[in-house]
Image (tube, rainbow, N blue to C red):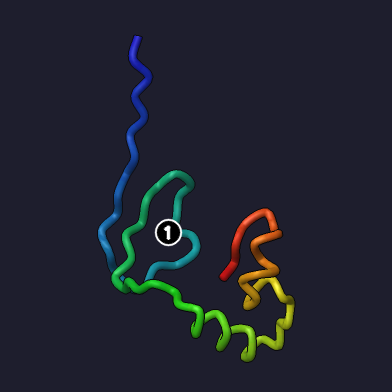
Amino acid sequence: MSDETTTTVIPAQLGRFFEDFEVGTVYQHPFGRTISEADSTWFTLLTCNTNQNHFNAHRSCSASRSLT
């Protein structure tokens, strides 16, 4: 007996509402980029979230997962 799971992949499009999303479905995104250390620093400054785990690589290494 084979245990096949099918994943629905929805192509990229703009303008989805919360109700359009379904659990287990993969939604491709039209925009793609890698978040850099500068992005993390700007977000930290924008939100005034000065938690060291967000922008201090040495400290985040001791965390369960790296956020930088």
Residue nearer the viewer, 55 or 44? 55
Residue drawn at x 37%, y 51% as measured from the top left? 26
Placement of 51 over or under 48, stated as above or below: above
Residue lying farthest right? 51
Quadrant of the snapshot with the N terminus: top left
Residue drawn at x 39%, y 68% as measured from the top left? 16
Placement of 62 over or under 47, stated as above or below: above
Placement of 23 over or under 56, stated as above or below: above
Q: Which residue is mark 1?
A: 20
Amino acid type, residue under disc 1 in the picture: Asp
Instruction: Point out residue 42 in the picture as x, y percentages from the top left corner.
Output: 56, 88
Residue drawn at x 33%, y 66% as measured from the top left? 29
Quadrant of the snapshot with the C terminus: bottom right
Q: Residue 5 falls in which quadrant of the image?
A: top left
Q: Is residue 49 left or right of residue 23?
A: right
Residue lying farthest top? 1
